[in-house]
Amino acid sequence: MTSALISSLGLCRIAAASTPVRVADPGANAAALIAVADGLVANNADVILTPELSITGYTIGDLVRNEDLLRSARHALRTIAEWTASHGCLVVVGLPMTVGAQIYNVAAVVQGGAVRALVPKTYLPSSHEFYEHRWYASGSDALLHGIRSVHLDGMDVPFGSDLLLSDEDHPDCVLGIEICEDLWAAEPPSGALAAAGATLILNLSASNELVGKAAYRRQLVQGQSARTLTAYAYASSGPTESVTDTVFSGHCMIAERGTMLVESERLVIDGTAVVTDVDLRQCVRDRRANGSFTSARMGSVRRIPVRLAPSPKASLLRTISPLPFIPSDTAQREERCREILQLQGTALAMRWRHTGSERLVLGLSGGLDSTLALLACMQACEILGRPASRILAVSMPGPGTTERTRRNAEEFARSVGCEFRQIPIHDAVQQHFLDIGHDPSDHSVVFENAQARERTQILMDVANSMSGIVVGTGDMSELALGWCTYNADQMSMYGVNAGVPKTLVRHLIEWYASYTEDVAIRKVLADILETPISPELLPPSTSGEIQQRTEDHLGPYEVHDFFLYHVIRLEQPIRTVAIEAMLAFAGRYSAEQILEWCEVFVRRFFSQQFKRSAMPDGVKIGSVVLSPRADWRMPSDASPSAWLHELSRLRTDVGGHS
């Protein structure tokens, strides 16, 4: 992957560093800051954040009133600013600064050889080990007194807690700043800054370490990044601060939209730093669909123009999960699977009870989707206190059915204790071919769809005969690709899997297999998981094996689920989706394969919308759903031309850089 393609993603590289300090020695601290910044710039950092009062040290106490220290701090700030003249990055440092008769705890933004802005701390802690009201004035006082700038080194530098720094070349990059206690307040300044347009919040902090405090601090950073839909960088003072009464851990974190991207070790004496790429464009995309931002009342803010001039990135400092629907953490994944099955079961139980139906009826093929649907039916029975015998699982072997899947369907149904019925469809579809004048040796779409529609007819009529409802088995990935037959497996009385993508279906069954103590169930689930994904609508091989493999025709479901998540949930441009897929699946699939499958996804997603427009009710499970009554409204006759054009351009770019 070339730097040009990676740079086209528009990511911003952020560094949060806990720099070592000598308390009350601004000159030494400036040198240490520059040494750390040199290393971070070598790693192509665009923005470098340092802790609260990083130029003097946070624990200077009453020395903050000493004019020699204050003068030395300003000189150190000038030294750091001069260093930035030959670097394209933006650096944020902390120092005490006199304005009139008051001293403020400020964050200084330096870039391009000059101090661009000064942001004073708003909330001053003054309890327990903190005494900031003893020394500092609040940034809100400065606003009340009309202080808008500070004359510094011959320039009037904007001053205030109402400042945003906006990158002139990258409009999605808007920086807001708050300092330590500001985050812990009931209404952190970052909330108003985000409503006014900030996509990146920088927090200079001096949060001392106490038992259990790190976890709460982490929750604050993650939670605020989620509420504000921002990238939130946090850098705190480290152990080289005074340990007279307390110790600081140097906790550094960068979160984005509720996800912790990177986090430092704590209590590292020589300092620590974390660096990652944040997606500020994605923050903006998420806000477009968020009512609290579209209706937010923007406060009075001042925008300060900056120009970051980011350097080209040869690699990505950011994890792109190839399985965005699946948590990478094992414990979280198990909890997610348990919760999903409860959601499916509860939704189905409520629909079952509401209709007053006697039975749940579903087609059981021996494949992944119908297996999960039966598990949801069992969960519904448990919730309502009804026996599994109220479930009827119907196997309908036809011209494409293999003995393996037929056997697995029967064994699974009998293992869970539901009623099982086998109704072959060979004769029915042969009669249908005769009725419509179709040659049975012509294995076209007519041959395939006739089987699917015959099965749906059987299920509907059987359900009617026993006062039951037909439980749909098709999953969300099939709906996205239209890999279902209209008015056949596309239709049911309740689509219990409609919110579950194929990759998650597999993990749910794997989880259940590991969770259940029933050896027979575990054994049959293991074989179902190993069976190739297939609609089994074309005849098997002479040895009885599945020949019609879905992924051979469409491409891997894991790649299509990646496209599905990034196109629908993240609403990314198709070029970005394809590039990120190349990065996520690097070493497994080539760029050419990714582009080919992406084109398949786009073409099918657009052409098959009519099936989704007529889909039955089904429960929403996660943040992505394709129901026209819930999250996704799209005309069935929309054109994919713009997306295909972008893929064509990307194909040319990839070929030119290969």
Image (cartoon, rainbow, N blue to C red):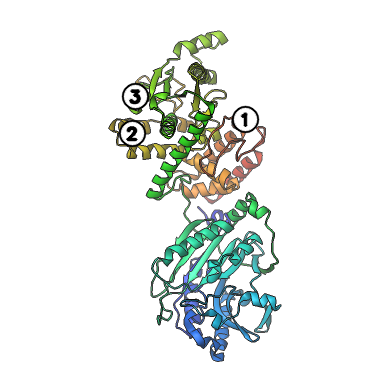
Sooner in the amino-acid sequence: mark 1 or mark 3: 3
Residue 70 in which image quadrant: bottom right
Residue beneath the point at 44% across and 26% down: 548
Name the residue tied to disc 2.
Answer: 526
Sooner in the amino-acid sequence: mark 3 or mark 2: 3
Q: Height in image: 104 above or below 435?
A: below
Sooner in the amino-acid sequence: mark 1 or mark 2: 2
Q: Alpha carbon of mark 3 to alpha carbon of mark 2: how far?
A: 16 Å
Residue beneath the point at 64% across and 51% down: 291
Q: Alpha carbon of mark 1 to alpha carbon of mark 3: how far?
A: 37 Å
Label 1 close to label 3 by CB (< 8 Å): no
Of tags 1 and 3, which is closer to the observer? 3
Name the residue tied to disc 1.
Answer: 610
| Horizontal side of residue 360 vs 446, given as left or right | left
Amino acid type, mark 2: Ala
Label 1 close to label 2 by CB (< 8 Å): no
Residue in front for this viewpoint, 24 or 275: 24
Which mark is drawn over residue 414? 3
